[in-house]
């Protein structure tokens, strides 16, 4: 089992470190050839506008969609979650999203960097604190999408079949509950 981390921009190194601390083999994904070597994929937090451009220029956008259709598990955190959405409300237009999870996201919905916060996430076995950094909010969810966790009543962790999105970061604070969920419920149980 090798888990890829999209390594075009953003905090991919932190995701790689949390995979390592779980004893899971991770691999940076920068090209379609890299993607062929992995069984699952994490899209990190960062800047979704930049990542969207790089997804197109690398040709990875089409390849990721193809693999998702073949049921590869994919988890997007924050900017990664934005890239997974079918619809994005944004002051700056995104060049593309992967359109793999039926939801509308509002980018930077809690305000600017200064309004970033540590919030308590509830829905998995035990509540935990997670970082919301210029995080998006979900304003619409498709019928086939399950809400797995909330913070301050907002929907913050969503799943549609093999696709998982969290509007927060877990890889920054050593909090591993979402990674454990991804590994146990979406990869091992396939
Ligand atoms: N606001 C960023 C964006 O729209 C996401 C921030 C993040 O990933 N922490 O891309």
Image: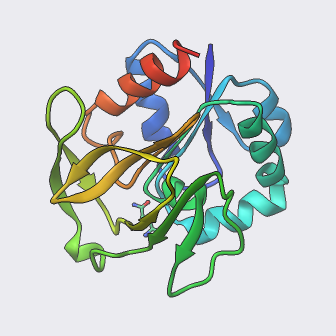
Ligand 1 rendered quadrant: bottom left
Q: Position of residue 124 (x, y in %)?
A: 24, 32
Q: Position of residue 129 (x, y in %)?
A: 16, 44
Q: How is the image coloured?
A: rainbow
Give the quadrant of the C terminus.
top right
Give the quadrant of the N terminus.
top right
Residue 136 located left or right of residue 6: left
Vertical arrangement, residue 85 with respect to residue 1, above or below: below
Q: Nearer the viewer, residue 136 or 103?
A: 103
Which residue extends farthest front?
143
Q: Going 77% across and 31% down the picture, which residue do you hit?
A: 70
Residue 112 located left or right of residue 187: left
Q: Going 49% across and 53% down the picture, which residue do you hit?
A: 143
Q: Position of residue 3 (x, y in %)?
A: 60, 25
Q: Is residue 29 visible?
A: yes
The image quadrant that residue 123 belongs to is top left
Q: Nearer the viewer, residue 72 or 8?
A: 72
Q: Going 43% across and 74% down the picture, which residue do you hit?
A: 106
Vertical arrangement, residue 184 with respect to residue 111, above or below: above
């Amino acid at each position: 089992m090798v888990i890829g981390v999209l390594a075009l921009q953003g905090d991919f190194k932190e995701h790689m470190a949390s995979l390592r601390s779980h004893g899971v083999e991770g691999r940076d994904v920068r090209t379609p050839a890299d993607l062929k070597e992995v069984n699952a994929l994490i899209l990190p937090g960062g800047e979704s506008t930049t990542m969207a451009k790089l997804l197109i220029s690398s040709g990875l956008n089409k390849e990721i969609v193809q693999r998702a259709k073949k049921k590869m598990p994919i988890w997007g955190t924050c900017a990664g979650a934005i890239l997974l959405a079918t619809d994005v409300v944004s002051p700056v237009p995104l060049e593309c999203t992967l359109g793999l999870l039926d939801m509308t996201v509002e980018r930077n919905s809690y305000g600017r960097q200064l309004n970033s916060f540590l919030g308590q996430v509830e829905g998995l076995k035990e509540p935990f604190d997670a970082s919301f950094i210029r995080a998006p909010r979900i304003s619409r969810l498709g019928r086939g999408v399950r809400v797995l966790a909330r913070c301050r009543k907002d929907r913050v962790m969503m799943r549609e079949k093999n696709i998982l999105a969290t509007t927060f970061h877990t890889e920054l604070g050593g909090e591993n509950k979402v990674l454990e969920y991804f590994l146990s419920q979406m990869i091992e149980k396939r």
